[in-house]
């Protein structure tokens, strides 16, 4: 019973880490990465569709992205979506290909991005801690219903705390790597 609960909590914590990693992929580091624009929502036949489902995105140079839409009619909507996004990039189109030049980040912008990364890391930590709290509440309920002993409750609580510490450490490492990427000139 406790092992099932631990598996369930680990699954929730894994999802929190995955959401964070996906979220951080969209934060600009001064280097061209297709992950920067993959999730930009483009209007496609009346519905909002992620850019990676409408075009091939590549990084032919360290500071440039190339976007080749599968339909030439999508060039204007893609350009419009990129301009609307908070990326601060200006698309350059030749009718078949959209180029995005990634400018160098100023020191002030780097510091702003690091603050954003830290805020997202903290949000992920809150999600992990919420998972811990819910799991401990479930354990307490098991104990109150005499499904587990008091000793099992304390052992389970310690296991959940170890798992939480492990995931918090993982989040800190992810955050440190992203901050290094942003600081890289």
Image (cartoon, helix red, strand yellow):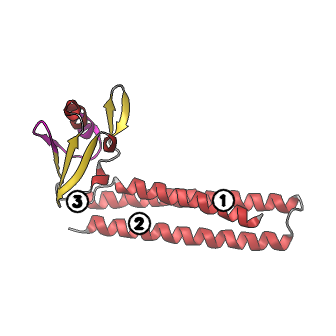
- Seen as rendered, the residue at the extreme right is 146
Read off the magenta span: 80-98
Q: Residue 145, position in %: x, y?
A: 88, 58
User: Which image quarter: residue 76?
Assistant: top left
Q: Residue 21, position in %: x, y?
A: 42, 59
Which of 149 and 75 lies nearest the eye of the viewer? 75
Q: Secondary structure at mark 2?
A: helix
Q: CA distance from mark 1 to mark 2?
A: 25 Å
Q: Residue 7, position in %: x, y?
A: 66, 63
Left-right relation of 119 to 164: left
- Seen as rendered, the residue at the extreme top is 46
Circle 3 or circle 1, nearest the eye: 1
Q: Residue 86, position in %: x, y?
A: 29, 44
User: Which image quarter: residue 112?
Assistant: bottom left
Which of 69 and 153 lies nearest the eye of the viewer? 69
Residue drawn at (64%, 61%) of the image: 9
- Seen as rendered, the residue at the extreme front is 70
Instruction: Give the numbered dot on residue 30.
Output: 3
Which of 22 and 115 lies nearest the eye of the viewer? 22
Instruction: Give the numbered dot on residue 142.
Output: none
Tag 3 near tag 1, CB within 8 Å: no
Instruction: Give the numbered dot on residue 8.
Output: 1
Q: CA distance from mark 2 to mark 3?
A: 17 Å
Vertical arrangement, residue 169 with respect to residue 106, above or below: below
């Amino acid at each position: 019973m406790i092992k099932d609960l631990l598996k369930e909590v680990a699954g929730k914590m894994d999802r929190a880490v995955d959401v964070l990693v996906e979220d951080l992929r969209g934060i600009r580091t001064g280097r061209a990465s297709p992950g920067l624009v993959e999730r930009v929502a483009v209007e496609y036949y009346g519905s909002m569709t992620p850019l990676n489902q409408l075009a091939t995105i590549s990084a032919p140079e360290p500071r440039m992205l190339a976007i080749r839409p599968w339909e030439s009619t999508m060039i204007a909507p893609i350009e419009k979506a990129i301009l609307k996004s908070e990326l601060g990039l200006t698309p350059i189109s030749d009718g078949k290909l959209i180029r995005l030049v990634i400018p160098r980040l100023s020191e002030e912008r780097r510091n702003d991005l690091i603050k954003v990364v830290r805020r997202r890391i903290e949000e992920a930590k809150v999600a992990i801690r919420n998972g811990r709290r819910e799991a401990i509440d479930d354990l307490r309920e098991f104990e109150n219903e005499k499904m587990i002993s008091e000793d099992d409750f304390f052992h389970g609580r310690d296991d959940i705390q170890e798992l939480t510490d492990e995931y918090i450490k993982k989040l800190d490492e992810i955050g440190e790597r992203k901050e290094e990427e942003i600081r890289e000139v």
